Image (cartoon, helix red, strand yellow):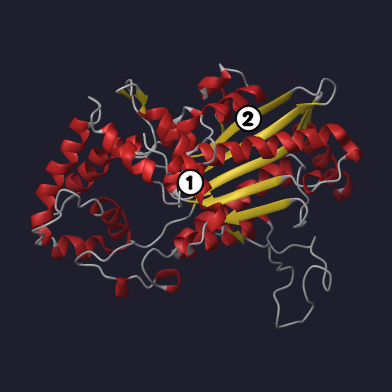
Amino acid sequence: MIKAFSLCLVALGYVAAQSGNIKLEFVQSMWRHGERASQIDLYPIYEKDWIFGGGGLGELTAIGMGEMNDLGRLIRQRYVNTFNFLKPKYASKEVYVRSTDFNRTIISAMSMLYGMFPPSLYDIPNVDYPFTPFKWQPGLTFVPVHVDGPQQCAASQNCPCPRYDLLQARMLALPEVLPKFQQVVLLNRQIGPHYNMTTGIDTFYTYPDTWKCQRAYFNKTMYEKLPWYNEDLYYQSQTVYAPVKGFLEGNFQNSAVSNGLDVALEMKKVRAGVIINELYNRASEKFDCAELGENCTGYLKQLKFYGYSIHDNNVYAVLVALGIPNIADTIDGWPAYAAGIFLEFHRNTQTNERFFKVLYRSNANANIADVTTQVPMCNGAALCPFAALQNLANTIKPLPDITTLCNSPL
């Protein structure tokens, strides 16, 4: 009876993954790391106080590990249990995960994969893990996380880009931008003197994010040591900075043309152009491979899930490029801890028509939700034509390449 019930669930999962002639072929995902410590010292909290998750500035906390583990469980629920798309235990040809070279993103990926492929009866002793009682947890297997090197910095915006600096200066000429930056400067001038700052006050940009981290663990200390600090001021710091953070990734509400230059478009090219084109090119190759069937011999033949463990601004840049930045749904504008984007690539097995879906997890307490109909280029379609992603990739593609573009004058 149990076996029959299990087979029934598998069959239902297969129907979910392949409805009619529409078959799920590939998933690409990117997520923000889990909760972390502050990245800088700021009175009254210093690096020595951040003892969580190994200790140190910018490190993933234990709560952050749990947030990412929950994300992994959601991924497993969808692609293993419901869709029967991935095998129930790690298969090296099916899953590839990469990370930026930061402890918090690497451990986030590891924590996510622990939730995605937890110790289970599917794992075979002396095949998937060593059978050494009292020395190795039964069923525990490791999944590799590939760390980006210098040649892969562009996808996560970690390459030097002088053109981006020039674009930030140019955008100050836009009517929409200057008033928002002025509000930031006024707030900085209100806050800076409390920290005995005498220089650099106008560019004192680090306290909003630092407060967000500090209040999660040291809220009582902040109120004791900072008599001028309160919740209203904290909320103001997040909301005043939110539109400026949007500008930095190319999100403008009005026309962003300055002296004939479309600043918004040029921002998207240097901030999201590389990763969007990576996503499109990889999916296109996967579709080609699926159409070839047995004649496909490349690494993409068996690859089903490709993931990026990255940062809030990276995820946000993709949301901006997709035209759905407001879906981040946070007071500071950028995605919350453990938020993630999922692009599912589907194919009509009879006509070979290509489609994609966009899904989003907004925070550590949310489920993965289908938001395809909210993506402007999809025009309300539940299955978005793959040509729409191709058009986006072509529009914001850094030409002739990201290095040359970044070193080009405006």
| Left or right: 71 as drawn, with respect to 296 | left
Above or below residue 390? Residue 293 is below
**Whole-percent x, y for residue 382 in the image:** 63, 22
- The residue pinned by badge 2 equals 357
Q: Which residue is mark 1?
A: 365
Real-space Cα separation, disc 1 to disc 2, in angstroms: 22 Å
81 left or right of 158 in image:
right
Q: Is residue 358 above or below residue 154?
A: above
Q: Quadrant of residue 53?
A: bottom left
Q: Residue at x 20, y 67 (%)?
A: 44
Q: Could you say where residue 358 lies in the image, as x and y percent from the top left?
A: 59, 32
Query: Disc 1 marks which amino acid?
Result: Asn
Q: Nearer the viewer, mark 1 or mark 2?
A: 2
Q: Quadrant of the C terminus?
A: top left
What kind of residue is marked 2?
Lys
Q: Residues within 10 Å of mark 2 (few under 14, many from 20)?
A: many
